[in-house]
């Protein structure tokens, strides 16, 4: 099996239906399939060695998706790279991955050509190449489901990006389960928010192909203009969104529904960070009949491993459960002795199953650290991925996200999860969003926040719900919290801002 079969089947069953659309173009399944064959033919003329990385300088357009399809049709794997990133970072990714080619949807920056020796080929050149059916058939004949499908680059602690390599088997194991779990069908119109180098977009793209649905790529500018965003969702008749938490927060934080809510939107799925209940309630009030789902899972386990369908109202200081485990995946929450945690305890979330990525491309050391033998199984080899995320096993039988291991601190003799403080700050009236840092030099907790509220008001509210040692020592009001390119709060940038202000 190869993920390209999802496109081929939909092209045969619904050739004239729009598959992918953006503000400038709309392409049917038949057109995407034909374009993929042109791209694959070019790649196969360039090299017949299979399972090689091919990088794509992506933008928010259907051409990027067509390039992905052509790459996997040629039995290679794609590496999406955001063209708006600094050229030096793009060059760093290329140096790490060493792709056989870089496809430029638009003109590649001249500085990049000077920094990298990777051949750069224009997308228009690829799609103008005649289709070589014999070469394509030969490539497909050798396909294995363990072939890599894509590599998504995530930040690395050393400053060098890590390329998470995901196989066709893992993708094809997850997508049907994802679609069936939430009842998606061919009538779905997915409103894509996530950049294509963020694995949230994988669910948009391949759910569209699997269902024979439609995906509309929402322009970036809509997320800074909520009125335009709501109008776009209405005009495109979006039924389902799978968005990063920060995207939902932006809309709710500026009262984006004051002119009305999207009429056709019936599924709202979110992931990436803890969803602030206050802002979640804004969405639920605007869309009382929609289904809301909290998703959890890192890129290394092919999108998600757990989900919780909201079935009740939540108080401002409550947490959303991580919920159920997707079929054919197993989640273990292990303590420091690699034993399952008991009720009331916190441990690291670990995952096993077909969903696991192949590892980090060209990075065997980091792969060996994260993808390990399941310590609970000593009878035969079974790979387990250590997420680095902590979860608490609560008395109600649910697991609740606690923090990143990186965000645990020791303060005044107490071990503290910074995200617990953030959750309580988010419940304070007047606070829109909050993020906490720890200044280990001065041994102080720093609270960065957005909202029309004073430091003393926040402290007074926190005193009612947390012990004294959890109350931040420094408060940093901001107009907005910086976001990284994946839409998550950029803690590194917050740290830089804090340091720049002289602590």
Image (tube, helix red, strand yellow):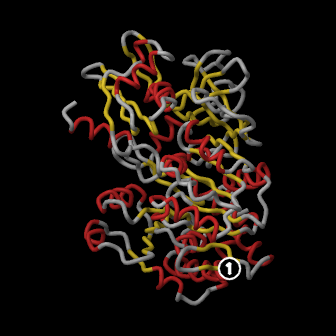
Quadrant location of the N terminus in the rendered image: bottom right
Is residue 442 left or right of 419 when viewed as pictured?
Answer: left
* Residue at screen point 70% across, 66% down: 209
Name the residue tied to disc 1.
28
Identify the residue shown where x is 62% and y is 62%: 191
Q: Which image quarter: residue 331?
A: top right
The total number of labels drawn is: 1
Furthest residue in direction front, as rendered: 259
- Depicted 374 relative to depicted 268: above or below: above
Question: Does residue 444 appear in this view?
Answer: yes
Give me the residue at 53% from left, 40% from top: 273
Q: Residues within 10 Å of mark 1 (few under 14, many from 20)?
A: some
Q: Nearer the viewer, residue 437 or 198?
A: 437
- Whether residue 143 is visible, yes or no, is no
- Can you say whether 127 is above or below 442 in the image? below
Name the spot of residue 201 as percent of width and height, x first. Answer: 58, 58
Q: Position of residue 66 (x, y in %)?
A: 58, 74
Residue at 60% in and 71% down: 69
Q: Quadrant of the C terminus?
A: top left
Q: Position of residue 80 (x, y in %)?
A: 48, 62
In terms of depth relative to the viewer, which is nearer, 252 or 6?
Answer: 252
Q: Position of residue 150 (x, y in %)?
A: 56, 59
* SS label for mark 1: strand
Residue situated in front as seen by the camera: 132 or 214: 214
* Residue furthest out toward the left: 502
User: Vertical placement of 176 versus 51: above or below?
Assistant: above
**Would you place residue 421 above or below residue 51 in this image?**
above
């Amino acid at each position: 099996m190869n993920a390209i079969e999802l496109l081929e089947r939909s092209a045969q069953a619904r050739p004239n239906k729009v598959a992918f659309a953006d503000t400038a173009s709309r392409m049917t399944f038949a057109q995407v399939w034909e374009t993929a064959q042109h791209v694959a033919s070019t790649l196969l003329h360039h090299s017949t060695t299979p399972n090689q990385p091919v990088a794509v300088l992506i933008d928010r357009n259907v051409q990027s998706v067509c390039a992905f399809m052509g790459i996997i049709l040629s039995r290679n794997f794609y590496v999406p790279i955001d063209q708006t990133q600094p050229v030096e970072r793009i060059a760093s990714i290329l140096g790490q991955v060493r792709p056989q080619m870089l496809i430029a949807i638009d003109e590649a920056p001249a500085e990049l050509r000077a920094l990298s020796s990777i051949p750069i080929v224009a997308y228009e050149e690829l799609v103008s190449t005649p289709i070589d059916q014999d070469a394509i058939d030969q490539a497909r004949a050798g396909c294995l489901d363990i072939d890599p499908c894509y590599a998504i680059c995530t930040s690395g602690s050393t400053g060098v990006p890590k390329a998470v390599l995901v196989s066709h088997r893992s993708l094809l194991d997850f997508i049907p389960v994802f679609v069936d779990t939430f009842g998606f069908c061919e009538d779905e119109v997915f409103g894509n928010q996530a950049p294509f180098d963020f694995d949230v977009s994988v669910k948009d793209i391949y759910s569209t192909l699997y269902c024979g649905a439609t995906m509309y790529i929402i322009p970036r500018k809509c997320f800074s203009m909520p009125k335009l965003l709501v109008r776009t969702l209405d005009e495109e008749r979006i039924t389902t969104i799978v968005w990063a938490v920060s995207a939902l927060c932006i809309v709710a934080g500026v009262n984006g529904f004051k002119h009305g809510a999207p009429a056709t939107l019936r599924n709202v799925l979110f992931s990436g960070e803890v969803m602030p209940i206050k802002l979640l309630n804004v969405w639920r009030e605007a869309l009382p009949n929609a289904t809301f789902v909290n998703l959890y899972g890192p890129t290394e386990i092919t999108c998600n491993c757990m989900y919780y369908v909201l079935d009740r109202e939540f108080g401002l200081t409550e947490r959303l459960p991580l919920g159920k485990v997707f079929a054919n995946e197993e989640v273990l929450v292990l303590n420091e002795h690699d034993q399952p945690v008991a009720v009331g305890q916190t441990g690291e979330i670990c995952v096993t199953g077909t969903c696991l990525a192949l590892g980090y491309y060209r990075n065997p050391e980091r792969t060996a650290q994260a993808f390990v033998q399941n310590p609970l199984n000593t009878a035969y080899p079974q790979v387990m991925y250590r997420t680095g995320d902590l979860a608490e096993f609560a008395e109600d039988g649910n697991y609740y996200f606690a923090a990143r291991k990186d965000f645990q601190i020791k303060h005044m003799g107490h071990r503290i999860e910074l995200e617990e403080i953030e959750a309580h700050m988010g419940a304070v009236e007047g606070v829109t969003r909050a993020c906490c840092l720890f200044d280990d030099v001065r041994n102080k907790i720093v609270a960065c926040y957005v909202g029309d509220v004073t430091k003393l008001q926040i402290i007074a509210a926190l005193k009612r719900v947390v012990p004294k040692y959890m109350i931040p020592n420094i408060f940093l009001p901001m107009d907005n919290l910086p976001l990284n390119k994946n839409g998550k709060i950029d803690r590194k940038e917050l740290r830089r801002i804090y340091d720049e202000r002289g602590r």
